[in-house]
Image: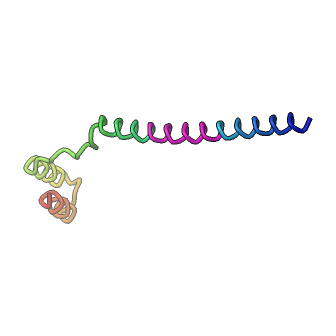
């Protein structure tokens, strides 16, 4: 009976070792695949959109129109003009 108990214990130990190793390997492979997949999707995605360049003359014309209509004060117009010209 003692031999049978040792054999069962040895089989259980081997099974636990094999299962633990398989779990560890699967975890490493899964992490590697996720990292590779993450790199592939990020490379396939377009880069973030840059703001479209503004047409300075067009913007100044719009601001002058707003000033002339009384929507912008002279101070607001000068501040916005400085912002547009800073680009």
- The answer to which image quadrant residue 70 occupies is bottom left
Task: Tell me: 79 left or right of 37.
Answer: left
Q: Residue furthest bottom?
A: 75
How many numbered circles are shown? Answer: 0
Residue nearest the viewer, comparing 28 with 15: 15
Q: Which residue is pictured at 14% across the width and 61% down the height?
A: 86
Residue 72 image point, x, y percent: 22, 57
Residue 19 image point, x, y percent: 66, 36
Residue 47 image point, x, y percent: 27, 42
Q: Residue furthest front?
A: 3
Give above or below for 30 relative to 82: above
Q: Quadrant of the N terminus?
A: top right
Residue nearest the viewer, comparing 61 with 19: 19
Q: Is residue 21 magenta?
A: yes
Task: Tell me: 59 left or right of 12.
Answer: left
Colour option used? rainbow
Residue nearest the viewer, comparing 45 with 19: 19
Give above or below for 81 relative to 20: below
- The answer to which image quadrant residue 6 occupies is top right
What predominant SS class does the magenta segment belong to? helix
Residue nearest the viewer, comparing 33 with 70: 33
- The answer to which image quadrant residue 78 occupies is bottom left
Which stretch appears magenta?
20-33
């Amino acid at each position: 009976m003692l031999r049978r108990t040792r054999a069962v214990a040895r089989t259980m130990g081997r099974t636990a070792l094999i299962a633990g190793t398989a779990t560890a390997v699967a975890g490493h492979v899964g992490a590697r695949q996720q990292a590779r997949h993450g790199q592939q999707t990020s490379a396939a995605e377009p880069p973030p959109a840059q703001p479209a360049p503004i047409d300075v003359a067009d913007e100044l014309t719009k601001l002058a129109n707003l000033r002339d209509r009384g929507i912008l004060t002279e101070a607001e117009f000068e501040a916005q003009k400085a912002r547009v010209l800073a680009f």
